[in-house]
Image (cartoon, helix red, strand yellow):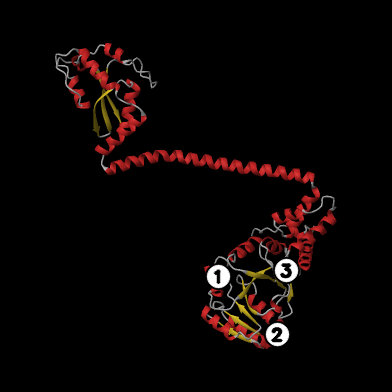
Amino acid sequence: MKIRRFFGKDMREALSQVKAELGSDAVIMSNRKLADGIELVAAYDKEPEAKLSIKKPAPSAAGRAKAAVPSLSEIIGDDGPDSLKALLEKQHGGSIQSPASAPSANAQHANKIASHLDFSEAFIDDVEASQVASEFPSHQASSLNESIDNSSAPQSDELSQIKEELASLRNVLQYQVADLMEAKSRRQQPVHHYLIQRLTDMGLSQSLAEQLISYTPSHYNERDAWVYLLNLLANRINVTGNDILTQKGAVALVGPTGTGKTTTVAKLAARYAQKYGADSVAMITIDTYRIAAFEQLATYGKIIGCTVRKAQSSEELSDLLFQLRHKRLVLIDTAGFSQRDSRLIKQINQFDNGQMQPVKKYLVAQANTQYAALQRIIDAYEGVELSGCIFTKLDECYSLGEVLSAAVEYQLPVSYVTDGQKVPEDIKIAEAKSLVSAAAKLYKKYGLNHTTSNNVVKTARAV
């Protein structure tokens, strides 16, 4: 037999070298830790024909028994006795044969041990793990794991980059396919495509516009189809009529800041006082955040001649509602918060503490609010049972399609609309046909692409 030494930075690499160069017939004689890696001493019966990584089938046991085994003096180049049995005993703990035994017996014993060796990947992993656990300290083992992780990091970065490129290609393809489908639909149904464009320019969402178009008869011309769509949109809007001014109880107006809740409360109170008398209505404000909020409502109360109170907690609000139980209508003005403000939910929860009479809640929103902002506002009040909504500041709008689209898609009843600051003149009962007609007029006046000289883009002048 001959002995060879192999060096590797770890046990896996050293065992891989033994397996690649000597094959599965090699016998591991010893291993030793060095400063820069691991040293393995391996023995083999004969010189491999070629140092290739291709694994050849192992020879049969009879063939290995017939192979001639050179003496240890031939291996190490001296005249000392053959100590192969000592090396085998150190590695495998096998029985020691007598020196007088024939060389073929040593070869048979070595081949028998080698036949039980397993050079599979699982065996290499087990040997490496045991070697690291027994000879390496814990901090060196952790540094080895970190080096393995660092080596895999570039591969993960490359995979992430490939995934991003594939996602980008997918988005481009989807855009191109959608463009092709839209072009095909435009050729097949040019009138429908033109009407969808007009509805979206009026402020309606794309999904609502396509839904309305799907109910339009295909044989209608452009004018008839447009009138049909406006009537269909009016039928989809849910209006509640003059519900607040014809009912009894407590009503609270909620909504974001700056929507005109206080002015709307004063308008409703003035209208109610005109119909039933000033003693039949009262106003309560729980807006303790805005400066002079109570003073503003108290000024309206003096003009109208009705009672005005202020509550700073849910307990005070409950007491005031009990004290004013003889009033036909109690209007509650709430503080305005952003839909992203957590105080908004806390304030709304004051109406549902179980200690006061039921309070109907109406959402107050500006009619000139962006569609995305309207969606966030309505979503903020998702857990609140809204009896209806009031759209304010119609006189400041250039488009009404956004609020109409939100009211239809969220099935939000519309009660009143306001179009000015005058109390109580500038408040009207919501009517579906009037709202759609106003939206169409605004689109015709401001939404169409008029050819004027004012469309020149203004740029900054160099000084």
In this rendering, the answer to whether 22 lies above or below 442 is above
Disc on res. 273: 2
Residue 332, compared with residue 223, is above or below; it is below
The residue nearer to you, when weighing 85 against 171, is 85
Judge by depth and name the residue closer to the eye, 23 or 280.
280
The secondary element bearing badge 2 is classed as helix
Quarter where residue 37 is shown: top left
Residue 156 in sight from this viewpoint: yes
**Residue underneath mark 1:** 344
Check disc 3 and report its element: helix, strand or loop: loop
Query: Residue 15: horizontal and vertical position, in percent?
Result: 31, 28
Residue type at the position of mark 1: Leu
Distance from Cα at disc 3 to Cα at disc 1: 26 Å
Q: Which mark is residue 239?
A: 3
Q: Is residue 431 left or right of residue 322?
A: right
* Residue count near mark 2 (Cα–Cα under 10 Å), binned few <14, some 14–19, many ≥20: many
Amino acid type at circle 2 is Ala
Q: What secondary structure is marked by label 1?
A: helix
| Contact check, label 2 and label 1, Cβ < 8 Å | no
Q: Position of residue 122 (x, y in %)?
A: 35, 31
Q: Position of residue 350 (x, y in %)?
A: 54, 74
